[in-house]
Amino acid sequence: MNGQQVPGNAGASVDISAEEARLREAMRQLKLLHVKVSRCRAALRKKATANHAHQSRLLRGTIPKMLDPLVQKQPSRELPSPRVRKVASNNPPADVMYAAFMRAVNEAQGNVKEFTELMRDEKSKEVFAMAEKSSNENPFGIKAWRHQDHPNWFNLDKDD
């Protein structure tokens, strides 16, 4: 199949291997976009894993990750009396909670900005235009994509 020539609509020929390479690159771009936006929330909750930095950048868990500091018990300051200590242990200091929340918000803004730039990238625009053209030319030949059929869908290094 590599290097074969196929006549085009206007009599020009198209190199199949070049077309195949272009389609593979387009699929990699779509896979990257899909991975960025649709990772399961359970993976985002894992603590101290090797992938945690990568997983926490994904958009699906952005809002829950922003709200995490507000619902988690924060370390409290040393307080004089046991009664005051007991009340304060349920209410973390506002400055600690606010700082954690702002870190999460800033990280979320970076994640959204990264994804927006990726979506607006020329390569992504070309891929979406190619997909729209193909869909218009053959609207009934579109097969539904299911992640069960593609076990490596989340691994950017592997092709399905």
Image (cartoon, helix red, strand yellow):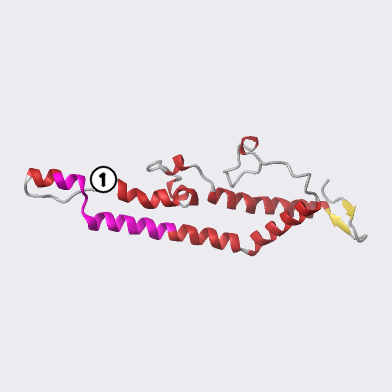
Residue 92 within the segment the image draws in magenta: yes
Outermost residue to the right? 11
Residue of label 1:
73
Q: In the image, is 157 to the left or to the right of 2?
A: left
Q: Residue at x 78, y 44 (%)?
A: 141
Residue that sits furthest to the top in the current view: 148
Of 157 and 96, the residue lying toward us:
96
Figure quadrant of residue 10? bottom right
x%, y% of residue 100? 31, 55
In the displayed structure image, the side of residue 146 where residue 70 appears, left or right: left
Task: Write down the region rendered in magenta.
Answer: 87-108
Residue 43 drawn at (x, y percent)? 45, 41
Residue occupying the point 43% across, 46% down: 52
- Amino acid carrying mark 1 in the image: Lys
In this rendering, the answer to whether 123 lies above or below 72 is below
Q: Is residue 97 left or right of residue 64?
A: left
Q: Is residue 159 above or below residue 107?
A: above
Q: Does the stretch in magenta take in 25?
A: no
Residue ID at (49%, 49%): 60
